[in-house]
Image (tube, rainbow, N blue to C red):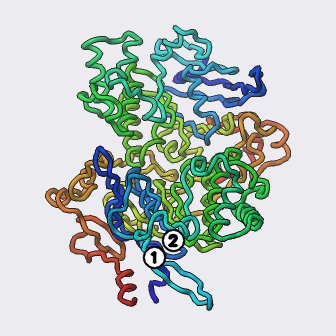
Amino acid sequence: MPNDDMLIEVRDLKTYFELIEGTVRAVNGASFAIRRGQTVGIVGESGCGKSVTARSILRIVPDPGRIVGGEILYYRRLRSADGNDVHERVALTELAADGREMRGIRGSEIAMVFQEPMTSLSPVHTIGNQIEEVLILHQKLSKKEAAERAAETLARVGMPQPVETLGHYPHELSGGMRQRAMIAMALSCGPSLLIADEPTTALDVTTQAQIIELMKELQAELGMAIMYITHDLGVIAEMTNQVVVMYLGRDVETADVVNLFHDPLHPYTQALLRSIPKIDAESRERLDSIVGVVPDPYSVPRGCPFHPRCPSFVEGKCDQEDPPAYVVEGRKVRCHLYEGQPAWRPDATRQRESEA
Amino acid sequence: MSEHGTLLEVQDLRMYFPIRKGFLKRVAGYVKAVDGVTLSIREGETLGLVGESGCGKTTTGRCIMGGYTPVGGDIQFRMRDGEWLSIPEQDRQGRKRVRREVQMVFQDPYSSLDPRMTLKQIVGEPLIIHQVAAGKQLEERVAELLSVVGLRPEYMIRYPHAFSGGQRQRIGLARALALNPRLVVADEPVSALDVSIQAQILNLMQDLQAQFGLTYLFVAHDLSVIKHISDRVAVMYVGKLVELAETRELYRSPKCPYTEALMSAVPKPDPLKRTERIVLTGDVPSPANPPPGCTFHPRCAYAQEVCRREEPPLEEILPGHYVRCHLARELDLKGVA
């Protein structure tokens, strides 16, 4: 089967927040896929919907957010009693958010590492308690087995004194160590997908380097896929294979990491890359900044949402029609500049459905 | 006392904060936030001050602003009329005088602007306090300042909540410029902003510098931003200045192992340049209890016996290149292009 390695498919996802001030279309038609063992980077500025997309996959969208359209498919691979792999397609969007099946997947098959470990770890439980809880719930281990496994996992993420750390509270650890504890907790059940939402943004550069190296090592060893959410293009270049650039709730460009950085197609990606100062740049010439600001979420512009800031803006076209996704050199891009190129279709899924 | 062109001289600055414990709040020790910073800022340049959290870069900036009275060392500032003033020794009146020439831009544009004040009040406040302008004249000056930073003068009747992060940082700049200062201490002015907005503010700061002949002390943790904006760069680690050099020289051939590791840790936005990097072990030590000898020795790959025992002095090993490292002359460290 050619698409055997498909893990997560997000199709035309729409997650809206109904507020008194209006409807915030946090995710407004995002589509992308994650394959087994792959590191997919989701990059974009604040408010582009990258975190809400991650929370939609885990079905932990905070109130009053609702998934109002699209679907998220999870291709599960299970080992059956007779030793064969069994494939199963689960539509995460169809499950009850707090139902049994979703709870079985969340934290076990799909795990998440959050940005600020101090607020996402419980301050009144020890590190040991928190990791053991995951193992007892999902893997049905006894208290003693869980404690052993927790210590092993902590050792694996480079915690200097794993057994002692089990008895520590989060506030007793440094930022980097807390993030290691978070990663240990996320990896304790051997997830097939690890969602990392800005895991190093709150850390210093030297600590960030430690965590990035750790995540690379762990991925090589355990083979899980990583969905890496960040606004930092340097981290994207360093960590990922495939990159999804998001702007105002949708994926504007999807490409492999080398093409994205060396031959970006979407004007937004191009502008973003031009606007960052580079540490190995030779000169100190002016930065090419993007004009204007990200529009406020209640009044997203008509047509292409990027058109008021776009240097290649075509009047009468970009401000009227929402651009469809095109396939250009095997990459996906949503921009009118590529009109005439073949339209993008979720081929992989289509094929799978016809086989089924 | 100093060569012509020097605007500010910081000599062996020390700022300790007491740690109080127990019922009687006895002093149990000190957080040595700044413990030996020596640097000078030349008129018209941008000096970048870089380091990780807790290294004392913000405290250094605040001491220069006169916000803290240091426990040791001195800060000399050359006033517009040529007179040298020691900032820590100034009384209330003296500080007010210095404040007309030294201003600050803060990191968080959401908490540094009073939500109950209009832009006119925010930007005009320094003008009123220093009795520079009032009435119609004040309004004209505020309008001028707003247009200088790229905001429409009509906005002066609005409140900060109506503005985005980038616009708020422009408001902060307008307020800092109100009194025509000569030195602006900018403490992480772009780190709370999105990348596309960051570039706008960096460009604006460079334009303002050219237009008004400003001198910047630019405090930041982002080495790429620091490289872009600075003429010279000072690196701090656990309260101490460890290296200071002209930007290109520092990035091309760092002399302190900490600077080398810091630069190598920055992820480069180019997937074809993924290189082996130096990953430091351990964490930044607490400034309340720094290690003996060189503060970096427990994490330093090149550390020798002498580093554990003796604290290295800050030495000028090449013209204009200052380093605090016992091995600075022997090591061949790698920079970024």
Give the number of the mark in front: 2 or 1. 2
Quarter occupied by residue A286: top left
In this view of the protein, which residue sits in the foreground, A275 or B9? A275
Numbered badge on residue A90: 1
Give percent across and percent down for residue A116: 56, 49
The answer to whether B6 is drawn above or below residue A103 in the figure is above
The answer to whether B48 is drawn above or below residue A97 in the figure is above
- Residue furthest to the front in view is A99
Amino acid tagged 1 = Val
In this rendering, does residue B278 appear at all? no
Q: Secondary structure at mark 2?
A: helix
Give percent across and percent down for residue A225: 54, 71
Amino acid tagged 2 = Glu
Q: CB of mark 2 within 8 Å of CB of mark 1?
A: yes
Which quarter of the figure is the C terminus of chain A placed in?
Answer: bottom left
- Mark 1 surroundings: few (<14), some (14-19) or many (≥20) residues within 10 A: some
Which chain is mark 2 on? Answer: A
- Mark 2 surroundings: few (<14), some (14-19) or many (≥20) residues within 10 A: few
Quarter occupied by residue A154: bottom right
The answer to whether A210 is drawn above or below residue A193 in the figure is above
Q: Which residue is mark 2?
A: A101
Write the residue at 22% across / 62% down.
Answer: A322
Q: Earlier in the sequence, mark 2 or mark 1?
A: 1
Quarter occupied by residue B242: top right
In this view of the protein, which residue sits in the foreground, A321 or A279? A321
The answer to whether B148 is drawn above or below residue A111 in the figure is above
Q: Secondary structure at mark 1?
A: strand
Numbered badge on residue B165: none
